[in-house]
Image (spheres, rainbow, N blue to C red):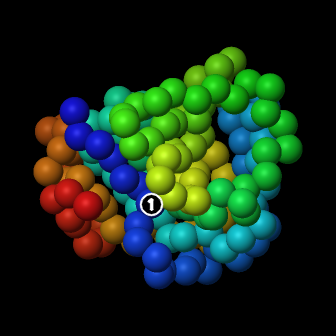
Amino acid sequence: MSSSSPVPPAGGQSAGGSPHTGGCLCGAVRYRTTGRLRPVVACHCSQCRRTSGHYAAMTSVSASELELTREEGLAWYRSSPSAERGFCSRCGSNLFWRPTARDEISITAGTLDVPTHLEIAEHIFVADQSDYYEISDGKPQKARW
């Protein structure tokens, strides 16, 4: 099982100005961001595929720029020695990916309220992608991270 890393190195700021809001399907988890969202990274690693059912499209902010406005359904799962994933324990929505060694948190882009003003910037871990789809959007592709 590969370790996914949906948080890119420092740099790329998006047009996704703040604030943004979002949450899970049932509403038991809601959040608000106060910082600029990074462009979306599509992660095709085996962990992201298994937690999302396809690939995970993730944006990110500094952990200090994410405010949980409702969190009674939030649960965390340690998916690797270096990261954990946040999900709703009621409806199962895949919400967050958090590395243990950095002050950043990735947010599943599909949980953001629209408009997001974001777009996919690149695909990572494409060497792990499943065999039932092709990546044909013309965005950069990286075999790993």
Q: Is residue 109 above or below residue 24?
A: below
Q: Please state which amino acid type lies under the numbered disc 1.
A: Val
- Dot 1 falls on a residue whose secondary structure is loop
Q: Residue at label 1?
A: 7
Q: Position of residue 65 (x, y in %)?
A: 73, 62
Q: State the count of labels.
A: 1
Q: Position of residue 118 (x, y in %)?
A: 57, 69
Q: Residue at x 55, y 80 (%)?
A: 13
- Quadrant of the rendering where the N terminus is positioned: top left
- Quadrant of the rendering where the C terminus is positioned: bottom left
Q: Quadrant of residue 126?
A: bottom left
Query: Horizontal placement of 143 versus 102: left or right?
Result: left
Q: Quadrant of residue 47?
A: top left
Whether residue 54 is visible, yes or no, is no
Q: Give 118 or 43, whichever is nearer the viewer.
A: 43
Q: Residue at x 58, y 29 (%)?
A: 76
Q: Is residue 23 above or below residue 106?
A: above
Q: Position of residue 38 (x, y in %)?
A: 54, 70
Tell which residue pokes out farthest to the top in this image.
Answer: 90
Tell which residue pokes out farthest to the right in this image.
Answer: 69
Q: Is residue 118 above or below residue 4?
A: below
